[in-house]
């Protein structure tokens, strides 16, 4: 049973985390630890490929948590060597079905000059067109994953080395991607020209590490060297260290602002600044933009907590844990009779009634997607005797789907796609509802002057509908971008 | 692999939670939900016994989380009926080995007047003497559990009804126990004369519920009726409702004060008051007793959070999440090489470096047992650049083992059994270390005048060495009580 | 999924095999091998209890084949010591349901003078009366197994040693039983006064072995010493060797004749003679009693093979494998659509069409129980183009249920309980049907003068209705013996 | 744990069985039944691909027996449609390791004109050269299987239809192969020009069936239509029925003679004649060629049985089951101590001592490969007191490895590669040892004049070293054919 994030029923979900290690004995063990620290980026499945000078490439792909699979000595012993890469992933609609384990990265291919493995975080927006072209020319796909295109493009490249073949391949690819790859002797990292997804470089003793987030450097005690830059490709070997290349045309970067709001772990560092601090600051901005008279600021745990602390701090309203989460939540629970069918959210959350009763509550959550969970939480709070409920949301209204590696509902299912703030307030049935403004969010992440509309500093397509890379496959299927509306 | 509480390496562990339901269709489903809400009281295994008027008694006992076992329709369908009881448990040293599943409660016995099942939270302090006596007389034990004595004593009673037999049996038993039992037609609840372990009565529609804690009433939407009183036995049937009996000599009650500090869930109600509120108040008292100049109050998550909020509130020092826990922690993780052997606590916790750096930190934890985890946390905080570390502990020093249903290390392993506060501070290597005083704790739980030394209002043996029931099996084995020292 | 004998749909099923070893390092390994060789006597589950001088008793009980459980080093390492006993069993109706693993033997009990484990093959015909009596006096049963009575009777005995307590217990017990038991230092074997079930003594190096059949001595290379005699109890220790006792009143023995016909493996020795040879001789007798003109003698594989060879040899008709069995048969197979529902027997057996076509076939089977499989086999043979089908059955008509440890359908489901030979022939739709006579069977097993009606040499109740021990529990429930008819 | 043929330690092993069905509702259920009947051809793993008009292609690949996987409704429901193919396989050395499940057929590929699945029995002797060529051109292989070349060759073909692409592909392929493949609408069957491996066509109601052997037609009640001819390709659809093509240059056929001796099930029909009958006739020929004075003819069960019956019949020496096999044998068993290490064969076979003792025994086995099992059997027979042991082998000496889909030890491990009959007799330590002559075998299979040395009617390379297709990959690696010696 693939488990899931305890509160993701109504969350956007990051689809992947990537990790790579070179120059350390039993590199796969480090990769397992790193993937464990990146588990929040993908909980359905994980995979590791390692290379040992004597015995060659080895791999293991498993459904379920890293801790339940890649902790067994019997499995880890099958992944020897000083070079390894790994991947954690969510499922996406396309992969449900017959051959799902084949969709779990890293992917491996044998080329005439040797094998290579590749794992990627993001989404290739022209993958379907590429796939059709490759199939026409005789490539056979193992998976339904967009990532597999890259390895087929590499297989068909006429370049003589794997890094050169990778450059060839990635130049054909559109979208957002942070790639970690390996040959028999090199660890490779690439970020797309816009740098939509994160990727950082770390150092541990004689070894090098690539990771989606810095929290996965911390877990092994590695030191953060720097972020891989947008459009940069690094090739790392123990002999030559880190070599940097620029395979793409330079473009202004557009890092995903939702990484700041929700995806990244609060103890990670993005752009030199703690995610926790940024979220705390979002709460501060929100308190300034949307103050309210109230008795208690409560987070929707756990993701709303830093912003709630910030809101409480700025507003002077006391902070308290008015909602308690059950730490033992898994994906499913019995709902066998009509009688107990509708207790859904209670399996995960319980109200701290004594704290709530008779009070005016500010409830701070990170985002509203469909609004389904928000409604249930509001009911719990009111049932517990709250006098007023004021929702404060640490992101702007999520009105557009993401095509860059995040699992979003179809546009019409996003509450904000067809309601304004007042309509949403009425729909949720709360006393007030306020989202942080897009400019407020930009200020909170450190852009003192807010969003630069001419050339936005981040990818904020999910809020603004401004897609920095045209989602060509989706457009082929009839998706209407904002411009087209 | 039976999983464990993510942070219990150096915690005392409650050994059990009990739950019972009568008068509801598919009672076992409600019991499963209740046990899920009581999972923090016991995570190794769980069991449910149900009774169906047509098909009789049914049972299932499983290792692992409730959510992983008692959620499967295929299993729950084997537990029909409108009457059911259940149990979650930790392992204890004695049960490790060959027949462990036999140690999982509820226990079932057939008597001449019909069958009965019984589950208990607590510990029988004369169980070994009773067991020897029963074996001499020809009883055959299925398990190594102390609880099984009760059912053998019942089997041998000359009384004509099961409730009368239970009274007979419980009068022979010493120690702390909250019992939930069932016959074919009745749900039974008992608390020992001191009322050491909790047990509450709830109402849901036409049905009745017994539960260790109120949070497990909330999960099914049941209403709290009242606590079962110390020394009370209730017998519940749909026809006659709740009948109350007093099988024991009356004695002043001695509820476990550690339930307030750590065991119970913060959203439960004990003695009419929210556990969260009590813990918040412990933080307030601690701030008054042990103030310090500092820049940030951080909880050791998650159990230290309410007290930390209270401390921050009272002291005026800002509150922040300086330590972030990994939500995906399980029991084990690979530590295959010397190199990465010592990262233990990092798998569970990571420091929010940006928040900590350069600051004077007040770290609020609920208790110190062996001190092993506290040392590691201190190191993490210092490594992250904290200027000072001040530990504030929301309970008095834990200096004595518990014999009433809690898994405690041997006395000599308890840090406070052989060190005073200053020695512990030096051992832990922190700038200051302060525990709340016993009187301060009593005040925080609502006893305005503190502890009544002549007749303490709570069982606080783990702090005071004052054992309200002589632990006779342990004394037989040579344990020295405080009086004997 | 508990597997089953590939052809037992319409067979009587032995319910148990027992095995014990003393004086050999890693005795449990030998027991596992022995149980593997006795697997035909019980395929649902198995258990082993071992005793190690340093660490005491150990046990493991598992559903499924011996080879799938007791071959894993990880399990076998938990069963140390030089003394071990084991058991394989079929399920019986009574044990289906909630606590089935508790019904798997050996049973273990702790007595005041130490622990003992016991395993038994057979059936206690007054078990229900004993159970009621024991429950009235306060014993608590773990299982629904009749065997558990023995250990409770032992627990209540006032004797000072376990062997004496066992004598006490077995004197209260009626029925058929071959017991293998162990204390910390002794291996014990007992056969009931009639000696209904087999039990043999073997020697391997310095060690001793007890086994249901000699084929399980062969597998470890042990030497057959002798059969345990009816009514004998042996107590074996490395120091004193084999001590023999006679706890029961002497009675003429009545060994189960169906062991000769079907239950025992053909390579076992019963009463000094090979079972294969006996079955071959049954075929010879059958050819004399019921000759027929035909072209080919075919066994119903595999149990009918020796008798078929004997029939062919005596009659001069060629022998051939007209029916081929699939070696990969398990218990279940998909039958999801109406279309392929009725192919049941084809999953197990296929006709060797080329051999059968146009011939007059003598089909030799060991027994006819309900007749269901016989009808299907006849159809297969006719579909394959046989000109005539003559059934020859290597046992008399099975007209009465067994109460001595064999799983028999209720009497009315036995074809021979309500049809004579001609009626059965017509029901099966074959050209002729002949069973061996009871006297013929006695001659084949070596009783030259046939059955001694005054004092039959064997238990043949399933054929004759002459029950050597009154089945008192069944009579209480209304079963009509032949005398009562 | 992948199970294995109970007696294959020293047997040649067929590597595959194939099966396909079109035009029947729930075709995958029929395929599962067929694969169950073909389980003797491959026991490590199995796979099924189905196609449903509405939902497209579906597949499942599993390690273990068909009966343990493809019997579960939950799995079979995922394989809807009226068209399905399946495969059972042994492991081969090459596939051991990381991605073994990827080596399990059928393979599936998406081409520009739609998907196709393919399963094959046999071996492609130029697979490695083809693989190198394909990788050079950018194909990415999923497996280490030789079969995957076919689907890549198809993917790269410029033909417009899948059958045409398959012809293209198969013309590039050398070796022995019987292919079953499917598109969305057609079932396809092909045999290589020499027809080395079997493939038959059956009819069931409105549907069509392709199967490696006729016994797998019998299991579903299908009627044998005919064998697919060597070099023939059939394309089957419900609309057009069976269309036959001849894609290859015609050559004289060379069917594998070892299918007659051992691989095929005795109840299958090869070339219009029962395999059982052929093997019986081999026994007859052997008795003529190699008579001996003896008291009993015993088969080594089960594969030696038909020849033993034939030998007994022709020689007039009585036939008996002197060796009894344990029906519950799996792949592994505990051998944890030196003491019991060497009992290997006893776990599978036991001697029927009473039958053997004091007799001169003719032991009939199908083949001798390494000779290891033969030596152990001889010892068992002598230990049981046989006076003389005469081995009679139902095939000529196996002196050459097979490269056409059979797992053979390296040449130097074949006993007959470096010993003549007399040396083997001495090595095995028996009184006499005789193999049937190659001419005798040809006579037994129906070639009255024996082997046509100029143009042998069968592939008998394992006996003669006369390889009808040059094993080019092996020659590249240094294998010396007979001609080269």
Image: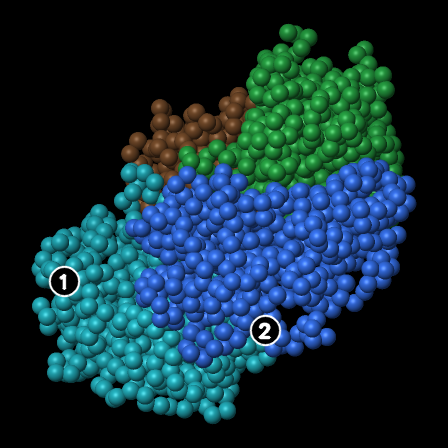
Chain colours: A cyan, B brown, C green, D blue
Cα separation, mark 1 vs mark 2, equals 65 Å
Question: Residue beneath label 1, please?
Answer: A417
> Which of the chains bears the disc numbered 2?
D
Q: Which mark is residue D472?
A: 2
Position in image of residue B328 (x %, y %): 42, 63
Decide if residue A211 is on the left or right side of residue D262: left
In the rendered image, is residue A7 in sight?
Answer: yes
User: What residue is rendered at 61% in x and 77% in y?
Assistant: D476
Task: Describe residue C291's horizontal placement relative to residue D98 as left or right.
Answer: right
Query: Disc 1 or disc 2, which is closer to the eye?
Result: 2
Looking at the image, residue A136 lies above or below residue D288 = below
Occupied quadrant, residue D269: top right
- The image quadrant of residue C329 is top right
- Lateral position of residue D345 relative to residue B445, left or right: right
Q: Secondary structure at mark 1?
A: helix
Q: At 72% across and 47% down in the image, what residue appears?
A: D282
Q: Position of residue B286 (x, y in %)?
A: 37, 65
User: At which x and y percent is residue C375?
Assistant: 57, 26
């Amino acid at each position: 049973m693939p488990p899931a994030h305890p509160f993701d029923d109504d969350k956007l979900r990051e689809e992947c985390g990537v990790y790579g290690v070179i120059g350390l004995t039993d590199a796969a063990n480090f990769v397992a630890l790193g993937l464990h620290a990146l588990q929040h980026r993908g909980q359905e499945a994980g995979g590791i490929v390692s290379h040992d000078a004597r015995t060659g490439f080895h791999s293991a792909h498993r459904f379920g948590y890293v801790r339940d699979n890649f902790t067994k000595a019997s499995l880890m012993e099958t992944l020897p060597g000083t070079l390894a890469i790994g991947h954690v992933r969510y499922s996406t609609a396309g992969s449900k079905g017959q051959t799902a384990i084949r969709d779990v990265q890293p992917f491996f291919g044998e080329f005439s000059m040797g094998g290579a493995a590749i794992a990627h975080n993001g989404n290739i927006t022209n993958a379907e067109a590429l796939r059709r072209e490759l199939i026409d020319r005789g490539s056979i796909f193992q998976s339904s994953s967009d990532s597999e295109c890259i390895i087929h493009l590499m297989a068909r490249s006429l370049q003589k080395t794997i890094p050169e073949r990778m450059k060839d391949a990635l130049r054909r690819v559109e979208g957002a991607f942070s790639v970690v790859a390996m040959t028999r002797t090199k660890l490779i990292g690439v970020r797309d020209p816009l740098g939509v997804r994160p990727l950082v470089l770390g150092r541990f003793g004689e070894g090098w590490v690539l990771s989606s987030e810095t929290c996965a450097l911390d877990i092994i005690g590695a030191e953060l060297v720097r972020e891989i830059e947008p459009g940069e490709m690094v090739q790392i070997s123990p002999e030559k260290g880190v070599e940097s290349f620029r395979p793409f045309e330079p473009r202004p970067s557009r890092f995903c602002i939702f990484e700041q709001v929700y995806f990244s772990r609060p103890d990670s560092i993005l752009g030199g600044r703690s995610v926790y601090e940024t979220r705390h600051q979002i709460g501060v901005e929100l308190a300034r933009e949307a103050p309210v008279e109230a008795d208690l600021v409560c987070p929707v745990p756990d993701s709303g907590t830093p912003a709630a602390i910030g809101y409480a701090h700025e507003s002077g309203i006391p902070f308290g844990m008015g909602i308690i989460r059950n730490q033992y939540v898994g994906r499913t629970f019995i709902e066998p009779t009509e009688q107990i069918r509708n207790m859904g959210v209670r399996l995960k959350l319980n109200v701290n009634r004594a704290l709530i009763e008779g009070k005016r509550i500010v409830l701070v959550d990170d985002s509203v997607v469909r609004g389904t969970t928000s409604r249930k939480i509001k009911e719990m709070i009111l049932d517990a005797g709250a006098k007023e409920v004021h929702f404060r949301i640490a992101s702007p209204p999520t009105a557009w789907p993401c095509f860059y590696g995040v699992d979003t509902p179809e546009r019409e299912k996003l509450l904000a796609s067809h309601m304004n703030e007042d309509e949403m307030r009425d729909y949720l049935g709360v006393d007030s509802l306020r989202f942080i403004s897009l400019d407020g969010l930009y200020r909170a992440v450190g852009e003192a002057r807010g969003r630069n509309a001419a050339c936005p500093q981040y990818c904020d397509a999910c809020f603004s509908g401004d897609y920095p890379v045209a989602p060509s496959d989706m457009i082929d299927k009839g998706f209407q971008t904002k411009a087209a509306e």
